[in-house]
Image: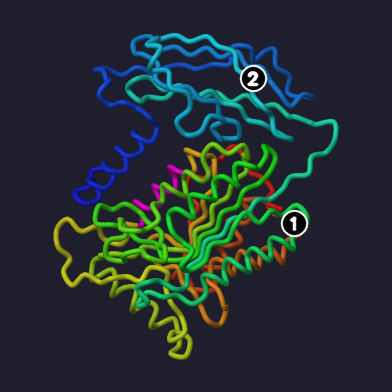
Amino acid sequence: MGSHDTALIRSLRNAYEKRIKKLGIDTTSFQNGYDLPTGEIANRNQISFEQKSGNLILKIIARDKKLLLQRLNILINETPIWGIKGIDLSGIKRKYLDTTVLVSLASGENIIEVSVFNQNGIENYRVPLSVNYTPEKPIVSKVYFAGIGTNQFADSTHNLRWCVRDIRDLAAALATKFGKQFVLVDTLFNEKVNRESVQSIKKKLLQAGINDKVIISFSGHGLLSGSMDYYLSTYNVNFQKPELEGLPYELLENLLDSLSARKKLLLLDACHSGEVDKEDVNKINQSLASFLPDSLSSNSATKGGIVTNTTTGKGKLGLQSSFDLMQDLFANVGKGTGATVIAASGGVQLAQERSDLGHGVFTFSIIEALKKFSTIKISALKKYVSDEVIKLTRGLQKPTARMEPLLADWNLW
């Protein structure tokens, strides 16, 4: 609050406008005044906690005293069943809605919430309803995995060493852990990594059922454009202008949206690259030099290919602010799709890959967790990976998992 960083303020404004557009909210319909809509499950007192049927009827009442209703959604375990945008109510031009909805329950606990937005983009206070569904026969869930890794680029000056191996070894470790339950959706490497090939993954992910799990893993460069939009590297990405052929972060977000599966995990072994303040870059270079011996540093790399800026200059977003913005974008994904997003690094840090490990430090730690634990929840995985990465890098890299879904903590394996 009260920040005088004009570049950060401009970037956050841009992120806000994109989020509003993504949610389908028409700012031209905003009215003066503030009013909070309400959304309730009117028949909640007639719904038992223990459920034997996989379908549940909800009587929904949404209202606003002053403003028109804009959008309706139902969230189960913080996953919107109608996707990020939900159902558009603007066409009915009403302040009151009474409707009945049939929702599908996943095996186990289902935390149900009603989300209502009015025309000013204000959401109701959500009051959760919990039910527990026990199917007659135990359900065996599948695990759908898609991996994207790039070592080689058209601009070879930014080549990496271990990204492809990161994805291959992670896929192999997951296949070993899950056996017949494992579904390899796709793996994209090097010149095969482009916007079209990544978008095509969505068709296969849509086959995942309500009780299945979806894991997407990316290993490569992370880049910020001049307008502070976040991109991931493709084979043909322009490192100076990542908006040219780069992979928009929103595209990965879209892969996780509107899936039947409600247990979704996105792993990002990448960090920021772009114009940063010279002071920030010198700080990182000094830290790396003091930490890595010559024999190791010569065979190590960072997943960001940072381009130093010789002047601080006005209007440039420093590295700390860049990461803060990037993490805010991750937070929005968690809120929007119900997915948990774990990123390799945060703050003034780099995502490292090390020759002595044969992997990025982040992915190496995840593979080690797969070998070490017979079962693990998402929250425990985040803690283990964070602790291991901090230990392996002596605090130079700290994984982040900002604003992940808080109501549901599920077993990854």
In the rendered image, the vertical position of residue 256 relative to residue 371, given as above or below: above
Q: Can you tell which quarter of the image residue 51 is in?
A: top right
Residue under the image location 30 percent in, 62 percent down? 319
Residue 325 lies within the magenta run: yes
- Residue highlighted by disc 2: 102
Kind of element beneath mark 2: strand
Q: CA distance from mark 1 to mark 2?
A: 32 Å
Magenta span contains residue 200: no
* Disc 2 crowd, CA 10 A, few/some/many (<14, 14-19, 20+): few
Give how far across and how far down residue 338 sits, in percent.
54, 40
Name the residue tied to disc 1.
178
Residue drawn at x 52%, y 12% as measured from the top left: 61
Foreground residue among 398 and 87: 87
> Which kind of residue does numbered mark 1 sit on?
Phe
Q: Where is the N terminus found, in terms of image quarters?
A: top left
Q: Earlier in the sequence, mark 1 or mark 2?
A: 2
C-beta proximity under 8 Å, tags 1 and 2: no
Left or right: where does residue 332 sit relative to residue 17?
right
